[in-house]
Image (cartoon, rainbow, N blue to C red):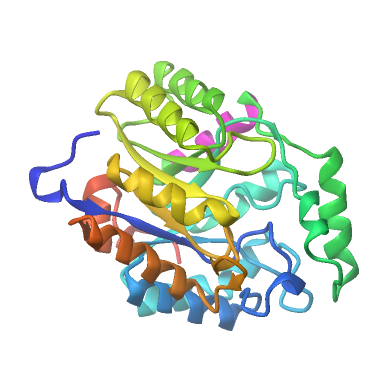
Amino acid sequence: MKKENNLNDKVIITCAVTGAIHTPSMSPHLPVTPDEIVDESLAAVEAGAAILHLHARNPEDGRPDQSPEAFAEFLPRIKQNTNAVINITTGGSPFMTVEERVAPAAKFQPELASLNMGSMNFGLYPMLNRFKEFKYDWEREHLEASRDLVFRNSFKNIEYVLETCYGNGTRFEFECYDISHLYNLAHFADRGLVKAPFFVQSVFGLLGGIGAHPEDVWHMKRTADRLFGEDFRWSVLGAGSSQYKIATQSTTLGANLRVGLEDSLWAGKGELASSNKVQVLKMRTIVEALGLQVATADEARKILELKGGDQVAF
């Protein structure tokens, strides 16, 4: 996991601005419209985020929208106003087909795109225990349907995303929700279908994936070290209330960090985050308190060996 010497103390902060897990009734601060996504993205970059992980939503009711047309409403505006690395999801929503999910990344050819590295149960329904009232009918249905949801990311699906995007120079944020996903990534590396350095995003605490215990973090890190040696760059995200605990432990182990209202709605126990910026600033405080520095967007490009913001199609 070795970087250039002058980048060893740099920590990349990714901000996942809105996602497709949380619904509008859960927080008035969740960005839904293109204007809100733009404003939240730019504020997160100002606070220290080098990478923006982006989803789109229907501005009328906030449901996930993976059409290229929805992304076109905000991608050029963000690019024109910031040097940040823009990362387009190919996860979309677990209820979508892989063809739907990959369409925006295929069209806009970003520097980075996310890629889920294995099929899994994807349980969102426990949030119904906390949130009782919903403004839109689709919200409750979305959560309840996850009781019987397998987020399909078969080997064929993964190959399809790789074949669709790699030719455009797009690299990947490999989202690994469990140990088996690291082995899936190693399988594709052995076949020569993915290129080092691998940007491994370890996801902790989502029902259906690995837990958020400190031993889970160690297990994920040890396994990635054994499989990839110096050929990967590690990043972590803790879902929900585990966000800051996971970040603190992992930073001491050399990780980069991901935050944002996609992954957690909270700024602290019982306190909704008023913005993505609030979460980025908290992460920045953790990083700097440990004697490290937040990476700039151009430093992130060097660390991850990205093609550059002038090589995208938006």
Which of 306 and 245 lies nearest the eye of the viewer? Answer: 245
Magenta span dominant secondary structure:
helix
Task: Identify the residue shown where x is 34% and y is 74%.
Answer: 47
Which x, y percent locates residue 5?
Answer: 9, 43
Q: Is residue 56 left or right of residue 189?
A: right
Q: Is residue 261 left or right of residue 237?
A: right
The N terminus sits in image quarter: top left
Q: Is residue 66 left or right of residue 232?
A: right
Which x, y percent locates residue 274?
Answer: 55, 79
Snapshot quadrant of residue 197 = top left
Q: Is residue 132 above or below residue 177?
A: below
The C terminus sits in image quarter: bottom left
Snapshot quadrant of residue 131 = bottom right
Which x, y percent locates residue 76?
Answer: 46, 74
Q: Is residue 106 above or below residue 207?
A: below
Task: Identify the residue shown where x is 70% and y is 51%.
Answer: 93
Looking at the image, how many numbered discs can be counted on the residues? 0
Can residue 295 be seen here? The reply is: no
- Give the extent of the magenta segment: 156-166
Which of 100 and 285 lies nearest the eye of the viewer? Answer: 285
Q: Is residue 164 magenta?
A: yes
Which x, y percent locates residue 156?
Answer: 64, 26
Q: Residue furthest left?
A: 5
Which of 195 and 230 lies nearest the eye of the viewer? Answer: 230
Q: Residue furthest front?
A: 269
